[in-house]
Amino acid sequence: MIAAFQKYMMDGIIGPGATLGSEVFLMNITRRQFLVGGSVALAALTGGRIGSLAFAQDDGDGRATGTDEILVLVFLRGGCDGLSLVAPFDDQNYTNARFNLIIPPDQALVIDPQNSTFTGSVGLHPRAGSLQQLYAAGDLAIVHACGLTEDTRSHAEATRAIERGNPDDPTITSGWLARHLQCSRPDGLLPTLVPMTGIPAALQGDTDAVTMTTAESYSQLEAHWRYRDIMLTTLKQMYSGAGYVNSAGTRAIETIELLKTREREYTPDVSYPSGFGDALKLVAQIVKLDMGLQVATLDFDGWDTHDYQGEYGSGYLATLVTTLANSLSAFYNDLAAYQKRLTVVVMSEFGRSLWANPSQGTDHGRGGVMLVLGGNVNGGKIYGNWPGLAGEDLIQGRDLRVTTDFRTILSEIVVRRLGNPRLGCVFPGFDRYEPLGVVSGTDQEIDYRPPGNRSIYLPLVTR
């Protein structure tokens, strides 16, 4: 806003004696100058959320959906070692290949896989006690040997393919979550939250997404405290009329004001770990403020464990697992009143190699692990077909084979929990809806049609 004001002064639109909230500033701006300067100012202020409310249009097929469900997507950046997080700890192939990187049988947190394809024992990492409790309570499901079916061990390629939701078409630029949101068109004040500084590729194309690191920083505007009230008052005056643009501006301002007045109402009911836990705590805060949150995405970095991964369940990886498990448990318990509306998905771009490398770590692999947590999750079970770890069962003699496409799990959640049957839009090219029963809900007639051409209607501007 300050930048727009300064630009108007430089261009001679307002005089040097005008103040930020003055009538001169508001009255002397033409419609064209308003659209060039004012809209940019508010877009910068609100993270670009004006776009989808003002200009997104229905594609006319009447299949739009809307629910009060909340989806939280956690991406473990770097390639999480699923064979340590959920370990076949008494498999001789595992112990022979891992050496001192194994999860020892006397430390593994043994779980019942409820899956006949597992012929041996399975245990969670010894630092994942919080996850074991959620699994035993039936709130946590695990999918093993899952991920991207395409042959790549590149972080960039695998991440791009997963977040775009269509590994077969590299030309797609939008994210799968963004395409889902185009179908559902949420109408809450803050429907999409990214509790970090950048928009992940899964939300690319969703201009409704709001990024923030704390509720306080978002509500206070990026300006000296002396000018914040003036800025907000001026914005209200600028966006006080009718039409899509004004409606979008008003909605953004309402979000800021609500956060400003209610941010201190939130007190977590549990203790969160720092770092990743702080990001989840912010999501819980926005959920509890009942601002219409439907989708939140966040990253947890550092899972590229090529070197010194940690011996016998200790070390660097153990620290990551501890933070992950305790943060997820705190988040879920903090939102006890919302658990029936909540689904949390944890995934990574790929798993890691079965074999330990000379640097006491593991290299990029293929099959990995997904975690699904929620009040409508059919937990206490490992889903998917376990391919085994014998040499002939592995990819190139080193990597866990992928037997469950990641889209199989996500599409089930999109249909059954988010109420969106338009999989052709969300996952173009994926025409195999075969739910495994990970979550409860109602199946609908699946629409495999690809996303159609959507018209964008701009306001008529005249001089």
Image (spheres, grey):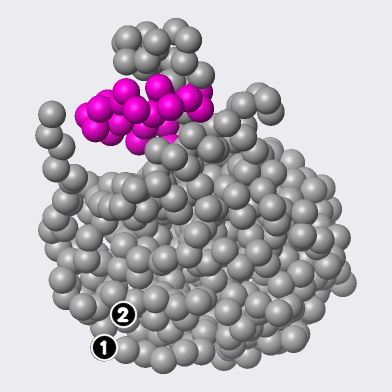
Q: Residue at x 32, y 15 (%)?
A: 13
Against 170, residue 281 (above or below) is: below
Asked whether residue 419 is drawn in magenta, I would say no
- Mark 1 secondary-structure assignment: loop
158 and 266: which is toward the camera: 266
Return the disc, 2 or 1, that comes first in the chain's sequence: 2
Q: Position of residue 325 (x, y in %)?
A: 75, 63
Q: Residue at x 51, y 89 (%)?
A: 440
Q: Residues within 10 Å of mark 1 (few under 14, many from 20)?
A: few
Against 307, residue 331 (above or below) is: below
Q: Position of residue 54 (x, y in %)?
A: 30, 51
Residue under numbered circle 1: 445
Q: Which residues are magenta?
A: 20-43
Quadrant where the image shows the C terminus: top left
Asked whether residue 27 is drawn in magenta, I would say yes
Quick check: marks 2 and 1 in contact, CB under 8 Å?
Answer: yes
- Kindly tell me whether residue 73 is visible in this rendering: no
Residue under numbered circle 2: 421
Amino acid type of the residue tagged 1 in the rendering: Glu
Q: Position of residue 355 (x, y in %)?
A: 61, 54
Amino acid type of the residue tagged 2 in the rendering: Pro
- Mark 2 secondary-structure assignment: loop
Q: Residue at x 39, y 76 (%)?
A: 66
Q: Could you give the CA–CA distance between mark 2 and mark 1, rounded to whole angstroms?
A: 7 Å
The dot on residue 110 is none
Q: Quadrant of residue 168?
A: bottom left
